Image: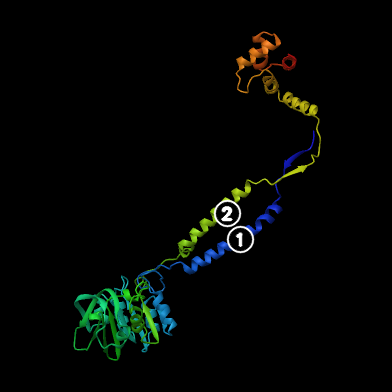
């Protein structure tokens, strides 16, 4: 047998050398995409959450205050407020569903320093700002129309829907923006009440003079204690899992990278490499191959398979000589062979398409008969 061209699959080392730059590029892209997503993904949170970058959060206001030198202390519970509060600090209380307990409100009222109460409900206002009460009607903003310096510097403000307040006793109360902002001084402490927090949120700060008013009200003291409790006192927040700490966008990036790697593996796995000439280590004679296959058939007593192989090979050689196509049926082949050889059609059909031989002698006789048919067809 002669040498022939064969396909040789590249070794593991060759595959790695050709793919390592692609793997490195994928890793770099994945790391950059992950870091970018972590830095730019919005951080969700509740309304006026100082760490939330969503539209209702207050991360922008906290960042602005800190840039202007205000020490912003985010207190998660009343104990943190009491530890951080000093006479020259401002305690900012943001109303939410967790700020409802009378005990917490009384402890807030007893904390030292000025007080900024945002969107208070009735009970919160009665304890933290008892000198004001809710007035009839509401406002959406406009000009301050008061002599409060912080409001006049801010000018026109857009609050959104806001409650309004008025004095409830003998203590003088300054009201601005039709009562949306109220301020009074009691026993050396300045108390400011705001009817809406919309102008302090990330989405509200860019409108009109909202950022200026939010900065002026929250930055009156060198230290601001931000109290918007994330949960009720005594309520456990639970342990966060690793999946909870991963932003949703990062998960999508990981799934996309997995899909890219899978497609790359399918694409590269189908490549068997270029055709190369390879010298076969052993040359085997055709007769030895036939003899070896014959011995295998004999050892397994597979006379039926041997007979089928002989008949198939004979038919593949004589059918073109008979002028028949590859789809010719048995009857047409038998008729053509019988006409060429001058034999009986039944005999020809038995030789070409008959049952498998029962003994080795029958297999030898079948081989001789097939060889005789092929010779006569070739010579006729």
Q: Please determine whether, in this image, residue 290 is positioned above or below residue 15.
A: above
> At which x and y percent is residue 209?
33, 80
Q: Nearer the viewer, mark 2 or mark 1?
A: 1
Q: Position of residue 324 (x, y in %)?
A: 64, 19
Q: Quadrant location of the C terminus? A: top right
Q: Earlier in the sequence, mark 2 or mark 1?
A: 1
On screen, residue 176 versus residue 324, left or right, reads left
Residue at which label 2 appears = 261
Callouts 2 and 1 close, C-beta under 8 Å: no
Q: What is the x, y in percent for residue 219?
A: 37, 84
Give the camera-side residue of 207 and 86. 207
| Quadrant that contains the N terminus | top right
Q: How is the image coloured?
A: rainbow
Horizontally, residue 356 falls left or right of residue 109, namely right
Q: CA distance from mark 2 to mark 1?
A: 12 Å
Residue drawn at 29 percent across, 91 percent down: 188
As drawn, the label of residue 315 is: none
Horizontal side of 343 relative to 256 (left or right) equals right
The residue positioned 45% from the left and 63% from the top of the image is 244
83, above or below 342, in the image? below
Q: Which mark is residue 25?
A: 1
Q: On the image, which quarter does residue 186 sit in?
A: bottom left
Q: Secondary structure at mark 2?
A: helix
Q: Residues within 10 Å of mark 1 (few under 14, many from 20)?
A: few
Numbered disc 1: secondary structure: helix
In the image, 279 versus 70, the foreground residue is 279
Judge whether residue 243 can be spotted in this image. Answer: no
Percent from the top left, x then y, of residue 167?
20, 84
How many numbered badges does the structure rendering display? 2
């Amino acid at each position: 047998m002669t040498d022939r061209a064969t396909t040789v699959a590249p070794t593991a080392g060759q595959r790695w050398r050709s793919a390592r730059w692609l793997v490195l590029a994928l890793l770099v892209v994945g790391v950059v995409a992950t870091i970018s997503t972590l830095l730019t993904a919005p951080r969700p949170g509740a309304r006026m959450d100082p760490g939330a970058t969503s539209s209702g959060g207050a991360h922008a206001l906290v960042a602005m205050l800190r840039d202007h030198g205000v020490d912003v202390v985010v207190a998660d519970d009343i104990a943190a407020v009491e530890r951080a509060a000093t006479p020259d600090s401002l305690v900012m209380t943001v109303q939410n569903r967790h700020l409802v307990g009378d005990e917490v409100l009384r402890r807030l009222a007893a904390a030292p320093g000025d007080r900024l109460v945002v969107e208070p409900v009735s009970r919160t206002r009665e304890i933290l700002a008892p000198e004001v009460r809710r007035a009839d009607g509401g406002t959406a903003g406009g000009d301050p129309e008061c002599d409060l310096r912080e409001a006049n510097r801010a000018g026109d403000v857009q609050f959104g829907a806001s409650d309004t307040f008025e004095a409830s006793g003998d203590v003088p109360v300054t009201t601005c923006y039709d009562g949306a902002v109220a301020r009074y001084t009691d026993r050396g402490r300045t108390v400011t009440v705001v009817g809406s927090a919309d102008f302090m949120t990330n989405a509200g700060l860019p409108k009109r003079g909202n950022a200026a008013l939010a900065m002026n009200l929250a930055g009156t003291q060198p230290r601001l204690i931000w109290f918007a409790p994330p949960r009720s006192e005594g309520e456990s927040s639970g342990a966060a899992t690793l999946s909870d700490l991963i932003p949703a966008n990062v998960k999508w990036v990981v799934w996309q990278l997995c899909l890219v790697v899978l497609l790359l593996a399918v694409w590269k796995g189908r490549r068997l490499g270029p055709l190369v000439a390879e010298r076969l280590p052993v040359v085997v004679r055709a007769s030895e191959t036939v003899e070896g296959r014959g011995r295998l058939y004999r050892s397994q007593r597979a006379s039926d398979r041997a007979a089928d192989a002989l008949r198939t090979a004979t038919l593949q050689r004589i059918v073109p000589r008979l002028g028949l196509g590859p789809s010719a049926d048995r009857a047409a082949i038998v008729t053509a062979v019988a006409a060429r050889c001058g034999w009986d059609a039944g005999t020809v059909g038995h030789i070409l398409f008959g049952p498998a031989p029962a003994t080795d002698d029958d297999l030898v006789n079948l081989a001789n008969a097939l060889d005789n048919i092929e010779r006569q067809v070739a010579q006729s």
